[in-house]
Image: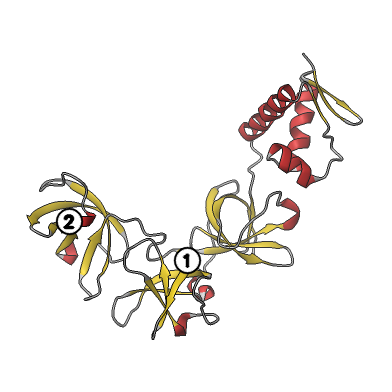
Amino acid sequence: MIQIGKTYTLDVVKQVNFGFYLNAHELGQVLLPNKLAPKECQVGDQVEVFLYLDSEDMVIATTQKPKAQVGQFALLKAVAIGRFGAFLDWGLDKDLLLPFAEQSRQAEEGRSYLVYVHTNRADDRIVASAKIDKFLDKTPARYKVGQQVNIIIAGTTDLGYKAIVEHKHTGVIYQNEVFKKLRFGQSLKAYIKQVRSDGKIDLQLQRGSKAELDQFSSQILTKLRQAGGFLPLTDKTDADVIYAELGMSKKAFKKSIGGLYKQGQLTIEDNGLRLVE
């Protein structure tokens, strides 16, 4: 079913002076204006477009890429404040409305807000809401341990970082397992560490698989060669220093150097690692 606020690949069925009409099935024929159409577009082509309502509430197509679609969360910047709320830059010519009633605190021009993009039931207009908790899925999550997921950093807790998982659920990345700076609203990949019996999700930023450890081992050897065969890093080195130097957690570092030591590729000295040629 074709829905407003989503991206689809549609057939070009008619050309007129001001653009092209696309077959949007249930929504009928939708206009793609000339200025937004691909070069040399013609009837019979297929075009990937995003569907939304224009200023006259008519369904229109665009090849511009929105920063979020209906059903997704995103960190968006307020570019203006109007009579009905704040207007957010979401990547399209027409800004996205964040109504006053959907603001968790009064929005200010120039600041960014984590919002959920949805359609207003009253008039089908696409709007944003900063009251994100009411849009999160409260049903039990069915992720597998080790599964890669897309997350958005949604805040901090006493335990670490709160994250939105796959635009649906909430999870936690524990502070002692974070080895790089995370920003509010940042989108990145993570892995399911476990889904607890109460439905809460624990996340980790590194999988710790054999392939990943092999990659880390290769990185360490490369760094050693670049440094002339010696690195002043040991299992007692601060985790932040290890991440800054090698881009890996201290746990991954210790596993990797242990494996390289057993293979006879390096020696572990009191003040660092030495490459064995």
Q: Which of marks 1 and 2 precedes in the sequence?
A: 2
Crowding at dot 1, Cα within 10 Å, few <14 / some 14-19 / many 20+, comes out as: many
Q: Secondary structure at mark 1?
A: strand
Q: Secondary structure at mark 2?
A: helix
Q: Residue at x 71, y 49 (%)?
A: 179
In-image side of 239 versus 25 (left or right): right
Q: Which mark is residue 76?
A: 1
Q: Quadrant of residue 265?
A: top right
Whether 191 is drawn above or below 166: the answer is above
Quadrant in the picture for residue 238:
top right
Q: Judge from the rendering whether residue 85 lies leftward or rightward of residue 51; answer left or right.
A: right
Quadrant where the image shows the N terminus:
bottom left
Rendered view: 67 above or below 245: below
Say what amino acid the circle numbered 2 marks.
Asn
Q: Position of residue 197 (x, y in %)?
A: 64, 62
Q: Is residue 32 left or right of residue 221?
A: left
User: Would residue 139 appear left or right of 82 to someone viewing this image?
Assistant: right
Residue at 65 percent of width and 29 percent of height: 214
Q: Answer above or below: position of 4 versus 259.
A: below
Can residue 198 be seen here? The reply is no
Q: Amino acid at mark 1?
A: Leu
Residue 54 appearing in the image:
yes
Q: Is residue 27 above or below residue 220?
A: below
Badge 2: residue crowd in 10 Å (few <14, some 14–19, many ≥20): some
Q: Residue at x 84, y 41 (%)?
A: 237
What percent of the width, then of the height, locates residue 57? 23, 75
